[in-house]
Image (tube, coloured by chain):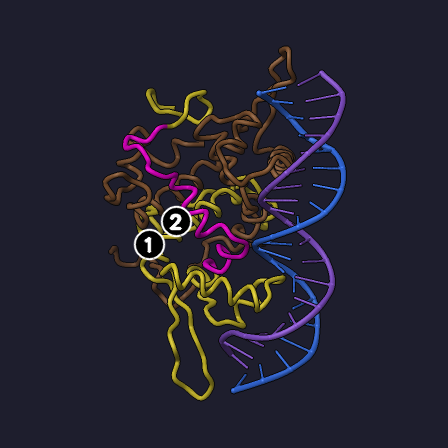
Chain colours: A brown, B yellow, C blue, D purple
Amino acid sequence: MHPGIQTADTRKPLTPAVPYRNCPILISVGILGKKWTLLILRDIGLLKINRFNQILRSLPGLTPRVLTLRLHELEAEGLIRAVMIHDTARIVEWELTDKGMDTIPILMSFIAFSARWYPDEVFMDQRARDLDEIYPQIHSLKDLG
Amino acid sequence: MHPGIQTADTRKPLTPAVPYRNCPILISVGILGKKWTLLILRDIGLLKINRFNQILRSLPGLTPRVLTLRLHELEAEGLIRAVMIHDTARIVEWELTDKGMDTIPILMSFIAFSARWYPDEVFMDQRARDLDEIYPQIHSLKDLG
DNA sequence: CCGCATCCAAAATGATACTG
DNA sequence: CAGTATCATTTTGGATGCGG
């Protein structure tokens, strides 16, 4: 451990160099913290499952009512946008906006946590891994979003 | 953008080098995704607000019933532990375990998102910032946890 | 098939009072 | 101080139906 780095087991709060007006975690949890929201972003952003019924099928327990709610919330926040496919039936594809792509590092941090602490559920061989090994094509979280 | 890096606007899924047995996001969202959970970890892990009524006061809307529920869930998952202060009154302090410290990068990714996209709510001067500027003492997310 | 809307039941959460 | 107990409210789930 480097000297001078504030680590998590200290008794003192980790204070930002710039004081906060409002807690940034509170704000983003307010936007992203409702049930199903992060999993819907996973579908659209990572798995490219981007149609209404495809998302429904990929998330057992999610109902059309709640999916409609979440999609409209995410659209209103500017995280996703609907791309109309001008075809016979009215078909919509959802995709991430630039703002929505900036939630991918959040998704990756959730992946990193599970891959370390729940390897027997995540991987066939039950060996813990970090993100570098899972996504070697990504050199830094900043390459995403 | 580096050539060969898979970015979020591609039509193709971002596939892991090692196939998943179960979705790691689903797993960690199941553990961390309930209402108030991440904010309680913020209190204990970042702000060092680690006593029951202090946490209650720091989170308007959170009730003692739900706080008890969440603390016991987090303890059962091994993310926090209670440190008894054997004193006059029965006083408990909650602290992160090593596993719990590994949720700090998740909290930081939420901070990074708000600091970029909601700077007017987060900062006095309304200027967007990244984590390096907010927490210059942290050289990498890996220094945490 | 597709994207919803409606109705009702169940689950999660909130408000308040109370206890060791 | 650190929780419980009880009840009210909000959010979410399940079933079904409907116009393209």
Q: To which quarter of the image does residue B11 belong? A: top left
Instruction: Identify which amino acid the numbered label 1 is placed on.
Output: Gly
Chain letter belonging to callout 2:
B
What element does badge 1 sit on?
loop
Determine which residue is flagged by label 2: B105
Determine which residue is flagged by label 1: B145
Q: How many marks?
A: 2
Q: Residue at x 49, y 56 (%)?
A: B37
What residue occupies the far bottom of the structure in this picture? B88
Determine whether label 2 and label 1 are within 8 Å by CB.
yes
Residue D15: x and y, percent? Answer: 63, 38
Q: Is residue D16 left or right of residue A16?
A: right
Q: Residue at x 44, y 29 (%)?
A: A47
Residue B93: x and y, percent? Answer: 42, 73
Q: Is residue B120 left or right of residue D7?
A: left
Q: Is residue B120 above or below residue B69?
A: above
Q: Is residue B100 magenta?
A: no
Q: Nearer the viewer, residue B24 or A140?
A: B24
Q: To which quarter of the image does residue A137 belong? A: top left
**How packed is label 2: few (under 14 Cα within 10 Å), some, or many (20 or more)?**
many
Residue B59: x and y, percent? Answer: 57, 62
Disc nearer the start of the sequence (2/1): 2
Q: Quadrant of the C terminus of chain A?
A: top left
Q: Nearer the viewer, residue A69 or A137?
A: A69
Q: Residue at x 33, y 54 (%)?
A: B145
What element does badge 2 sit on?
helix
Q: Residue at x 48, y 72 (%)?
A: B51
Q: Quadrant of the N terminus of chain A?
A: bottom left
The span shown in magenta is B15-42
